[in-house]
Each structure stands twice: as C-alpha cells, then as structure tokens.
Amino acid sequence: MMESQPIQPKSPVELGIWTRPSSGEEENGDCYLVKTHGENVVIGVADGLGHGKEASHAARIAMECIDSHAGDSLISLFRCCHEELKNTRGAVMSLASFHTTDNTMSWVGVGNVAGVLIRAGASPVPQRETILLRGGVVGLNLPQLYATEMAVYSGDTLVFATDGISRSFADNLSIQDSPQHIAEEIGSHFAVDTDDALVVVARYRGQTNAK
C-alpha cells in the first residue's frame, strides 16, 4: 500500500481504503497512490500480475512513476509506467484525476481494475459512470489509450477495486456512508481469499463554491 501524500481535512477529496493480501501471502500485489498536484488530485490503483513480492514490486514501481510525474496527463503517466515496468512482470492499472478548477474528472484504465463513479443525489443523470477498460498489461502490451472526462459535483464518489473484489460490489452500492466505511463494507463483503484485494473510495468535495 502506498499513499504519497496524506489527504488533509480541507482537501477536495475525502479518501477511504481497504486492502488485504491474498491468503498465504505477506505482501500485497495491489498498490494505490493519492497525489495532490496544484489544483488536481491524481488517484492511481495498480495490480501487479500474480501475487507476492514480484507483483508488489511491479505495482510499487508504477505508483512511484506516477508520484514523480503527477503533473503529466493520464495518458503520459501510463506511457511512463509502461517504460518503467518493462523489466517486471507488469501490472494492470486505473488512474483518475480530479480537476478542481473546472470541477471535472478524467480517468483511464488498462486491464481489470474496476472503476465506478456514483453520483450524489443532487447530480444529474446518469447516476452511475463506469470506467472504460482497455485490454492489455502495462509494461508488456500497452493498448491505444483514450481518457474520458466528465463533470463532477460535490458528493460524487469514485470507487476503484482490483480483481480480488467481486464485480458484484457495484450492483447496489450506496454512498450515504463515509468513504472509509464504504471501503470497509466492500472489502468485508466482496473480497475473495484467492487474490490480493484493494478498494479505494474517493469522494469529491470540490472547491467551496462547487455546485
């Protein structure tokens, strides 16, 4: 687990984390990063292929690359990670960036790290957005990438979950509770013992004048 910069009380994002290694493993091959850079908050989740030390090594290299280049575009960050991971077993990864200057969020995914944005009650339809995941492995075969951008509103809540979490976690997901409680509920009810598991929940607060 990796968090490059603690989320402060006045941050535009409120964070919740749940993480657990696969049964029998000491190291978790799933890693995350939260990085505030200027008016943006970058959130990344990487799942190193397989389990254990080598998977953790690959995922951590990816997060360190993002940490060092957080001001770049999401597509540029993927390209950076791809180069850095070429001598590892590789990783799948999803990234999102909240932009507080215009209250938007962009995201990109390669592999199978699920991403769902649940809209707050006052937000317009659709009430739920799902990340477009491109096939491939960062470090091995990077696909053509497309970033999706959308407006976000105070209270909108992003959830990233690695494949150690059953995909049914999003079927009846409620955002009434705190991000930490949501992350713990997803982890306790939908994690599988045979894989590393990680849930990252990020609730957008926005600027004080965000609608």
Image (tube, rainbow, N blue to C red):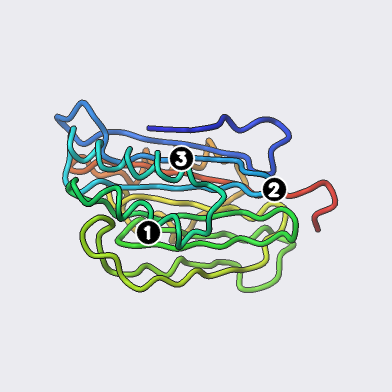
Q: CA distance from mark 3 to mark 1?
A: 17 Å
Label 3, secondary structure: give it: strand
Foreground label between 3 and 2: 2
Query: Which residue is disc 2 drawn over?
Result: 39
Say which quadrant the C terminus sits in.
bottom right
**Kind of residue indicated by mark 1:** Arg
Badge number at residue 33:
3
Residue 63 pos. (x, y %)? 39, 42
Q: Residue at x 18, y 32 (%)?
A: 53
Q: CA distance from mark 3 to mark 2?
A: 17 Å
Which one is in front, 146 or 204? 146
Query: Which residue is disc 1 drawn over?
Result: 79
Badge 1 density bin: few <14, some 14–19, many ≥20, Cα 10 Å: some
Q: Residue furthest top?
A: 26
Q: Are marks 1 and 2 in contact (CB under 8 Å)?
A: no
Residue 9 pos. (x, y %)? 70, 31
Badge 3 density bin: few <14, some 14–19, many ≥20, Cα 10 Å: many
Foreground label between 1 and 2: 1
Q: Residue at x 61, y 73 (%)?
A: 126
Q: Residue at x 49, y 46 (%)?
A: 69
Residue 73 pos. (x, y %)? 53, 59
**Which badge, 1 or 2, is on the more N-terminal residue?**
2
Residue 161 placement, left or right of 194: right
Label 1, secondary structure: give it: helix
Residue 176 placement, left or right of 123: left
